[in-house]
Image (cartoon, rainbow, N blue to C red):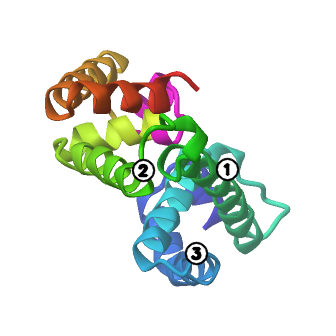
């Protein structure tokens, strides 16, 4: 099975996925306690396994290689989650001092709601770039689109957010997402 997988055999990959998906999912579920996130991270492990199948070792068990990828995906997710928290769990010092606590909470909610109004694909591209810190090239590879499409979608997202948020809200949004 290892050799077939290494050589790009889709049936071998499907068999590996079926055999290990539940174990990997439960690993992530135990770590994150979020079923949807655990599903996403599980899928990402197998995407990485397929993408880097030529690096599969014959001398290490497939189980070890899969969970090594899972651990790395989890570590990468933790790093990106820390970046995400920097943007959405904003330090009060980053928001103008003349805003009351309820105004700060309302502002965070307004910005998050504005991002939620983006079309699904555009929102995903925006989050990959500005929340998780992926490069245009990484996003294009991950989503199977051109770098030019990534650029175009990010520009459209920014234009839409500029229309959705008031002047002050947009300025604060821009500072939080683009000035750090």
| Mark 1: few/some/many CA within 10 Å (<14, 14-19, 20+) | few
**For numbered disc 3, what is the local secondary structure?**
helix
How far apart in space, not on screen, are marks 1 and 3 (Cα)? 14 Å
Marks 2 & 1, CB-CB < 8 Å contact: no
Q: Which residues are magenta?
A: 131-142
Residue 158 appears anywhere in the view: yes
How far apart in space, not on screen, are marks 2 and 1 (Cα)? 31 Å
Q: Is residue 179 left or right of residue 129?
A: right
x then y, percent, for residue 156: 20, 23
**For numbered disc 2, what is the local secondary structure?**
loop
Residue 161, placed above or below residue 70: above
Please report the residue visible at 66 percent of the width from the left and 64 percent of the height from the top. Answer: 70
* Quadrant of image for the C terminus: top right
Residue 52, placed above or below residue 10: above
Residue 33 highlighted magenta (yes or no): no
Marks 2 & 3, CB-CB < 8 Å contact: no
Label 2: which residue?
Answer: 100
Q: Main secondary structure of the magenta part?
A: helix
| Mark 3: few/some/many CA within 10 Å (<14, 14-19, 20+) | some
Residue 145 appears anywhere in the view: no
Q: Nearer the viewer, mark 2 or mark 1?
A: 2
Compare residues 76 and 50 and report the one nearer the observer: 76
Tell which circle, 2 or 1, labels the residue nearer the N-terminal end: 1
Compare residues 164 and 19 and report the one nearer the observer: 164
Label 1: which residue?
Answer: 79
The quarter of the picture where residue 152 lies is: top left
Tell which circle, 1 or 3, labels the residue nearer the N-terminal end: 3
Label 3: which residue?
Answer: 32
């Amino acid at each position: 099975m290892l050799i077939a997988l290494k050589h790009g055999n889709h049936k071998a990959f499907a068999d590996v996925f079926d055999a290990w998906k539940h174990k990997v999912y439960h690993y992530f579920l135990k770590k994150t306690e979020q079923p949807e996130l655990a599903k996403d991270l599980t899928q990402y492990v197998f995407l990485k396994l397929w993408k880097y199948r030529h690096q599969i070792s014959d001398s290490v068990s497939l189980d070890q290689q899969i969970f090594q990828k899972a651990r790395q995906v989890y570590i990468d997710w933790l790093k990106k989650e820390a970046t995400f928290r920097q943007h959405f769990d904003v330090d009060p010092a980053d928001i103008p001092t003349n805003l009351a606590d309820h105004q700060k909470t309302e502002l965070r909610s307004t910005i998050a709601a504005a991002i939620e109004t983006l079309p699904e694909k555009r929102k995903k591209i925006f989050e990959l770039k500005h929340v998780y810190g992926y490069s245009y090239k990484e996003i294009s590879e991950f989503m199977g689109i051109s770098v030019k499409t990534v650029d175009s979608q990010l520009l459209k997202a920014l234009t839409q957010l500029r229309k959705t948020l008031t002047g002050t809200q947009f300025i604060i949004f821009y500072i939080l997402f683009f000035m750090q």
